[in-house]
Image: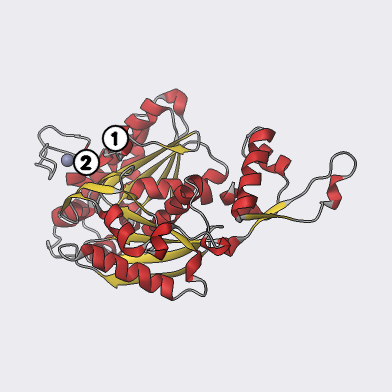
Amino acid sequence: MLGLLGQTGKLSRSEIAKLLSLGPATVTAQVRKLISDGYVRELAVDARSGAGRPRIPVELIPDAALVIGVSVTPTSLITVTMLIDGTILNARSHVFDPSQHVVEQFSGVVNDQRAALDHPERVIAVGISISGAVDQALSTVRISTTLNWQDFDLGPQLQRAVGLPVFVSNDLFALSTREVSFGFGHDRDDFLLLGLGYGVGLGIVNRRRVFSGSGGSSTEFGHMSVDINGPLCVCGNYGCLQVYAGLAELLQQAPGHPAAGNLAQLQARLEVDPDRELVEFMQEIGHRLGRSVGGIVNLLGIGTIIIAGETTCLWPAMSEGFNRGLHGTVLKFLHPVEVTVKTWTESEDAVGAAGLALHNAISLNVPLHARGRLPQTATE
Ligand SMILES: [Zn+2]
């Protein structure tokens, strides 16, 4: 509802009900709650309403609350501050070392981000997005191979350090949640979000809900084994998608590409003068991805795919193979499949984390600082 109001401006309760396919009683109850929580306000009676019951439009109070989103790479923390209508106030990058004093480094960047605001007391939650398996109910990291973390209770520790609710989630889950509220969800109820970066992941959105496994586990699309004779994966199995399409693995295996080569160098080579071996290598990765995603399309009957992540800058080199793999796999009655590639920016995952924190903070009823109802933790 907040995402809708953020995108469209003022709406009456009946317009909200229609646009979100909700019952009038549900909308009335939710709007009443959002008004009493201070996120939404009523405006003067709409002149358009004519005869009958007057329609009172409501609108967001965009700066009523803010959330901080943090994404993590092996060398940096990216932070953003987001208003409740999805507007990003600022994005920053900080040097990060995942091997030591992790909670101190996180609390440092969260406090810096808060200190830069006119109303730091309006920050209601922190979201953290991590590539790896996360127990989202407990905000703990089960395993992240890119950060070399295992069974790490990051959420509870950081919550104590900064005095705010902290929600740790898998990066694809966070991005998918944000798309539901502020992106694709505007006119789609079901879609798949293929994340291509250091990890390979798939967010599944069905009836506007992001799928999570039992106990809040994240989906592990990258560890789907696609070749029993393939190389050993960090997970201990053989031939996972990750060993072909993970960004580090892709860079290491690209023909004629030095192991130390980076993404920008490979992108430049593909754009300027790619040799045949390199072109085929990239199309083969696309093909494996297309076949795997095609299987999921068949399984779930969801034929809308968004592709996001750092590796999307190489997409032109993979798309033909991807489409071939996809169309050779997807059942005919599910055609046409719609594929959209999102432009990737460095702060994308942090924005996803902020979107998830906002969603959780509001649905879990975190009180607004701005209304003078400080949570216990903030005054300790
Ligand atoms: Zn694996």
User: Can residue 240 be seen in the rendering of this structure?
Assistant: yes
Coloring basis for residues: secondary structure
For label 1, the crowd category at 10 Å Cα-Cα, with few meaning under 14, some 14 to 19 and many 20 or more, is many
Query: Of 119 and 260, which appears nearest the observer?
Result: 119
Q: Which residue is mark 2?
A: 241
Label 2, ligand 1: CB separation under 8 Å:
yes
For the C terminus, which image quadrant? Answer: bottom left
Q: Is residue 117 above or below residue 261?
A: below
Q: Residue at x 14, y 41 (%)?
A: 235
Point out the quarter of the image occupied by ligand 1. top left
Please, what is the three-letter code of the amino acid marked with disc 2? Answer: Leu
Please, what is the three-letter code of the amino acid marked with disc 1? Answer: Ser
Query: Of 235 and 58, which appears nearest the observer?
Result: 58
Q: Residue at x 45, y 58 (%)?
A: 375
Outermost residue on the right side: it is 51
Specify the quadrant of the image occupied by residue 259: bottom left
Residue 23 in the image, given as x and y percentages of width and height: 66, 32
379 vs 181, left or right, is left
Residue 207 in the image, given as x and y percentages of width and height: 50, 33
Q: Which residue is mark 1?
A: 292
42 vs 7, left or right, is right
